[in-house]
Amino acid sequence: MTPKLSTEKLILREIKVNDLFGIHEIMSDDETMKLFGGQVLTNDLEIKDFIQIVKSEREDGISYFWSIILIEEKEFVGFIRLKSYNSKYYDSAFSSIGTHRFDNEFVKYFDRTNGWEIDYAISKGQRNKGIMREAVGAVLEFCTSENISPLYARVNSMTNSATVKILRYHNFEDHLPQVDPILLQKYGAKKIIEKNEMGMIFKWII
Amino acid sequence: MLSNFFGGGLNKIIHCEINGKETTIDKTRVLTRISGVVNLQMLKNPRVDLNQKVIYSDSKPPINFFIKIHIPPDLIGVLGELYAIVSDEDELEQSTHVLSDEGINVCMGRQLIKLIDYIKDYEIINFPETMFFVSANDISNFKIHNKTCDNWEIKYPSIGKKYMIKKILDTKITRRTIEHPGVLLSGYDLGIDDCSTKNPNGTGYMFKTERNFLPINFCSNESAVDYCKKNDSLVYFIDFMNGGKMRVLSEYTESINNNLQNHYKFRSSNI
């Protein structure tokens, strides 16, 4: 069971069937998914089992998923989740770097037994209202009370200043710079650094 | 009379979503996803306070419940009285469906039969999170809204937003067989078909659609299918009669259900 969390303006609660349309809206928006760092939905089939997957991952103890609801409007505006690195999620999270993700040189940066990744997405119309800052704060309080630590947050590009600001506000620290292999091939390292296009894995500990 | 109040006297025909027989809009029921049941026959000296929705007994501390479960008459002897519990009463997972008196018995009977093995052992039966179990109840138990159907313009009882539409940009119809269900072609958003063991050689439909869903009010699946025919659209909804899955209605829904030999010709298609 996903615990219900609340803040001044928000309720963070377990996923419900009617959230699916809101999740679809978020996941089919190119700009939002670029910020989130995931694939844009290409068809409706890709989302049809979303809720079942979330619920079974919770039953297996490898993820938490909270739908973010505005208290006053009772409206779904986004989601925030934790995914355990002690699961197959680690493999998929770093699949873009190929087998390098299993190298000791890389693995030493992560606590694969206790580490979790935090990520989140919010619908386009609700950005820049402080919603995600509040939501992340509530989840970190939960993590503190449940002794869930460390947390990692992957940011694909430092140009995503809103997310970087939220993470730094909540005392996430720069942990491991990341470079998109496709961008690296296309532009080279120098240009990526110049354009601030490199990514960062942030780390938070209790 | 409710059927007149909700426009049941108009010349629009709707059917029970279980047996497909003609019925009226006042047979709209509220389906609530529940997380477990309280089994009254296992409690010692139970007293049910229907106003406060609490069950007192000599064997357990007071238990809050959400609603009394509708038990079909032929199962009352086995199951006794059951009371539904929900995981989050602040925000219920609910929808409405049209079920005749016979239909509501079948709908509940199909689910409750799964509890028979547990009923002699447990006072409270909690369902796994992945299980979609609903309690179907009469609308008189709930605060309903009196809405107007955007297509048929008749009044109907509603518990909240249900249907969403998407405009179709392109349709591709192909032959399908049960052995070769086909794949969704690139660029298409959705595929449905009418293949089953009863109809091994069928038809597949693929749709390219606009990206975003738009909410709309329909009184029933019948009105939604009629809207699809007139507006080149698909209607999506979370179908509480089919596992709480996102499913779809289209202008081909009646034909698909005819070929699948379903009693209810307006049953949504799995996507």
Image (cartoon, coloured by chain):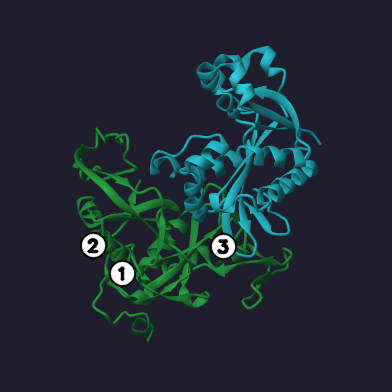
Q: Does the CB distance between marks 2 and 1 fall below 8 Å?
A: yes
Q: Please give the residue where the numbered disc 2 appears in the rendered image.
A: B230
Q: Quadrant of residue B84?
A: bottom right
Q: In the rendering, at what x and y percent does residue A125 appear?
A: 55, 53
Give the residue at x 66% y 42%: A162
Q: Secondary structure at mark 2?
A: helix
Q: Amino acid at mark 3?
A: Leu
Instruction: Look at discs 2 and 3 and give the one toward the viewer.
Output: 2
The hue of chain B in the figure is green
Q: Which circle's residue, 1 or 3, is located before the other in the chain?
A: 3
Q: Secondary structure at mark 1?
A: loop
Please tell me the numbered disc located at residue B151. 1
Q: CA distance from mark 2 to mark 3?
A: 33 Å
The hue of chain A in the figure is cyan
Q: Please give the residue where the numbered disc 3 appears in the rendered image.
A: B92
Q: Does the CB distance between marks 1 and 3 fall below 8 Å?
A: no
Q: Which circle's residue, 2 or 1, is located before the other in the chain?
A: 1
Q: In the rendering, at what x and y percent does residue A4 appear?
A: 68, 53
Badges 2 and 1, same chain = yes
Which chain contains the residue that carries disc 2? B
Residue B115 visible in the snapshot: no
Q: Residue furthest top?
A: A104
Q: In the rendering, at what x and y percent does residue B27 appear?
A: 37, 74
